[in-house]
Amino acid sequence: MKKTLGIILVAAIAAGLYWRDSIVAVTTPYVSQALAAVSPGTAPTAPADVKDPATTGNGHKQHANGDASAANGAGQAAGSGSGQAAGKASGQGGGRRGSGGPTRVATVSASAEDMPIERRTIGSIASPANLTVSTETSGLVTEILVKDGADVKAGDVLVRLDSRIAEATVEKDQAALTRDQATLDHARETATRQEKLLSNEAVSQQSLEDANATVKTAEATVAVDQATLKSDMVTLDQKTIRAPFDGRLGALQVVLGSLVQPQTAIVRLTRLDPLYATFALSESDASLVRTAQAAGKPIKVSVTPLGTTDAFTGNVDFIDAAVDTTSGTFTARATLTGVADKLVPGQSIAVMAAIGSTPVVSVPTVALQATQQGNVVYVVSADNTVAVRPVTVALSAGDRSGLTAGVRAGERVVVEGQVRLAEGMKVVDAAAETANGKPETGKQGKPGGDQAAGSKPTSTAEAQ
């Protein structure tokens, strides 16, 4: 039994080896063609010595030869293809590394100028007049002549109160004044007659003095009546509530028939033009602001509501005399005109205040390059050599920065192409070439152009 199992095992192994060779013989041409497609320089070849193992007695040996031929062909194709690819990569890489020459950059000239000292902060809009209109007398609301949120002028009637009692009092005082005025007129006529009779010695001196006293008493009575009438006229006028200044109303706090007392709120009135822009500046800027004010130079302010791009300008007209010790700031205020319906009291704003100017060397901000040691710029000398200069930035305004050290006015600084530069490199100034009318040079040709124009095949296989 063991002998039988051994024979069967040997027969199975032999059959496997036989069919392995058949599979290799069948697939070898396809492998060769695939390798030839990967490496165009190697022509595909089919093993000519491979025969059908069913009709060839020495099929195993022929299959083995076919396997060796296919392996050799694959090795040649792979070697040829990888060699060509490496050669092309080496040629291209060498071309880029070998294409030396000056680096193209763009430069501008640094200029000496007085740049504005700008401070940016946050502030708010305030109204110069914002109050609650109230009444000074009591009474019933009999008439409302405005609507909520209406725009009014100074003197416009807002609300009227019941004025019948006040009108009656005025009429009574006017009647009393008329009566007492008549008494005064009669006393004066009596005194005039007494004076004539005394000149004729028809009456005594005492009679004239009594007549004059009566005149003075009547004059005092008339004066009291006039004062009383004025007081009553004021009370009558208080029954009509008017707008004290131009502005916009809020919501009315009363309705028809409301009984109001002195100091009862009627409506809120807010002036909308002009408006104030109130903001805070650092105490370190106080001297600059005061110097500008003393010299009569306006401190211009640009105001932009948060979340928008609309800008409004004005001049600072108030500086607080004290510094807030808690925040280390002082309050400034600018007046904005023509901003009704554009700004609202209480609105948050971004403020840019130009509090003075200082002489600096101005360069575009893009010329600055940040390093671990600070900002630097690349300066191009007359012989187009690059120098790396550390600079001191005093301030920035818009797209320009002011320097106090590192660059002189008139020197050329690089604004484009700084990434490729280093100390002592030669450069080509694109701006100078454009100004001189020279065409741009040094552009790379199309991919493969150099090879197509000047390269030659190195072997017959490559030429084919």
Image: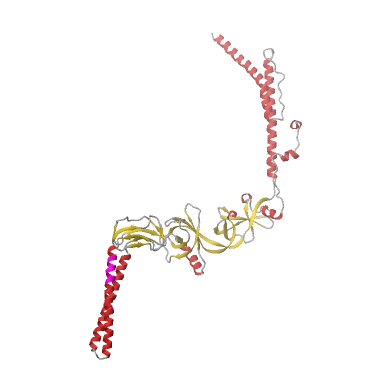
Residue for point 33% across, 65% down = 237
Q: Which image quarter is the N terminus in?
A: top right
**How was the colour assigned to the protein in this rendering?**
secondary structure
| Position of 368 relative to 315 (above/below) | above
Q: Please tell me whether residue 5 belongs to the stretch shown in magenta.
A: no
The residue positioned 61% from the left and 57% from the top of the image is 389
In the displayed structure, would residue 83 be above or below residue 438? above
Which quadrant would residue 93 be assigned to in this image?
Answer: top right
- In reply to whether residue 171 is colored magenta, the answer given is yes
Pinpoint residue 352: horizontal percent, then vertical percent: 50, 58
Q: What's the residue at 37%, 61% (across, down)?
A: 157
Q: Nearer the viewer, residue 274 or 70?
A: 274
Picture layout, residue 59 above or below residue 384: above
Q: Which of 440 and 316 is in front in this view?
A: 316
Task: Choose top left, top right, bottom left or bottom right for residue 403.
Answer: bottom right
Magenta residues span 167-175
Left or right of residue 107, residue 300 in this image: left
Secondary structure mostly taken by the magenta-highlighted segment of the chain: helix
Question: Seen from this angle, which residue lies furthest bottom?
Answer: 201
> In screen coordinates, is 344 left or right of 258?
right
Residue placed most toward the observer, 31 or 121: 121
Q: Where is residue 429 in the image (x, y as percent from the top left)?
A: 67, 53
Seen from the viewer's position, the closer of residues 273 and 230 is 230
Q: Where is residue 81 in the image (x, y as percent from the top left)?
A: 69, 31
What is the tally of numbered marks visible in this picture?
0
| Image location of residue 464, percent across then percent down | 75, 30
